[in-house]
Amino acid sequence: MSETKRKVLNITLKVITGIVFLLLLIILVALILISIWRPDPVVLADDNTTEKIIAFGDTRSSYVTHNEIVKLIDNESPDMVIHTGDMINITTQIQSWLIFLFIEKKLWNDGTEFFPVRGNHEDVKWIYNSIFRVPDGNTYYTFERMGIQFIVLDASWDFEPMFEEEKQIAWLNEVIVKDKDKPKIVMIHPPLETTGKYQKFYREGWHELFLENNVIATLSAHVHSYERSDRDGIQYIVTAGGGAPMYPATYENEYSVIRKPYNHYVRITRDNSSEGSYRFEAINIDGTVFDNITSSIKSLIK
């Protein structure tokens, strides 16, 4: 090998080594930041001191809108935040997770509890579980706050099976009947009632199961909009306006009460006008309330 070729080869190897070292350094720094910024472990205990819960989802692609929504939520000083799924565009993009966590960390830095719902854009489960310290590593779980039993399910798309479907549905059937008289909210990424863009997520007998066991509302995302459907007193709420582009309506939905293509979040509080009642309010990015409903076990039509 000539001296010139040897020099070129040495320079090439040094450049490649430098690039590899830089990439590894970037990954290391990113992992350190993720470990610092990710939410604290959730404490699954019955907590009746919770007074305000915020739900929102599909933050995904617009960091500016996402940041504005989070600033509004932070000003509310909620006790708990629920993200209904699709935090980022691609699960394997470390930079997207860093931006997501940087924006969101102002919430849990103030002591707000954070409960995630896994969406289709969180398709790589081990990455999702390494960022969100979900109970026992499970992406479906249950907990109690504000006198409500919350049931988190793991389903990504309207046309695909649920994660561990047979096992998960057996688990759902077991936990939903344990405290039959307690009001419940079911959280699942694809909507159970919707006018689209996508079809609703359907499992035979679920609506009847929810009615029998006092589910007063469901919280979903996936269809970028706000929508509330009222079916036999159960409020099927889609809150998917955290930053992703809005979707048009494409399907009929006989139960739909209101649908708005707004960037928004949903506030859940106790309604002190009636024991065991809860108020759901949809808040636009300009801070105005554009939908509100009070729901309770008594409002269910069985």
Image: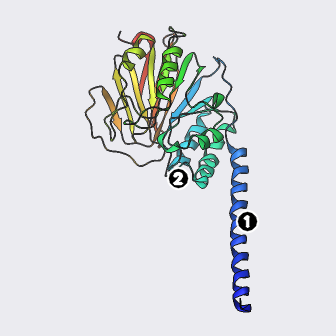
Q: Earlier in the sequence, mark 1 or mark 2?
A: 1
Drawn side of residue 162 relative to residue 257, left or right: right
> Front-most of 162 and 183?
162
Name the residue located 49 percent from the left edge and 44 percent from the top edge.
121
- Position of residue 287 measured from the top left corner of the image (x, y, whole percent): 48, 39
Residue 64's disc number: 2
Q: Which residue is mark 1?
A: 21
Q: Circle 2 — which element?
A: helix
Residue kind at label 2, given as amino acid type = Val
Q: Nearer the viewer, mark 1 or mark 2?
A: 1
Residue 87, numbered label: none
x 49%, y 19%: residue: 170
Q: Quadrant of residue 18?
A: bottom right
Q: Tell me whether circle 1 and circle 2 mark residues in contact (CB < 8 Å).
A: no
In x, y percent, where is residue 248? 31, 44
Residue at 71% from the left image edge and 88% from the top image edge: 1
Q: Relative to 117, does residue 15 appear above or below in the rendering? A: below
Residue 292 appears left or right of 179: left
Residue 101 image position (x, y, % from top left): 63, 46
Asked if residue 272 is positioned above or below residue 24 in the image, the reply reads above
Mark 1 → mark 2, Cα distance in angstroms: 32 Å
Q: Secondary structure at mark 1?
A: helix
**Residue 221: percent from left, percent from top:** 44, 36
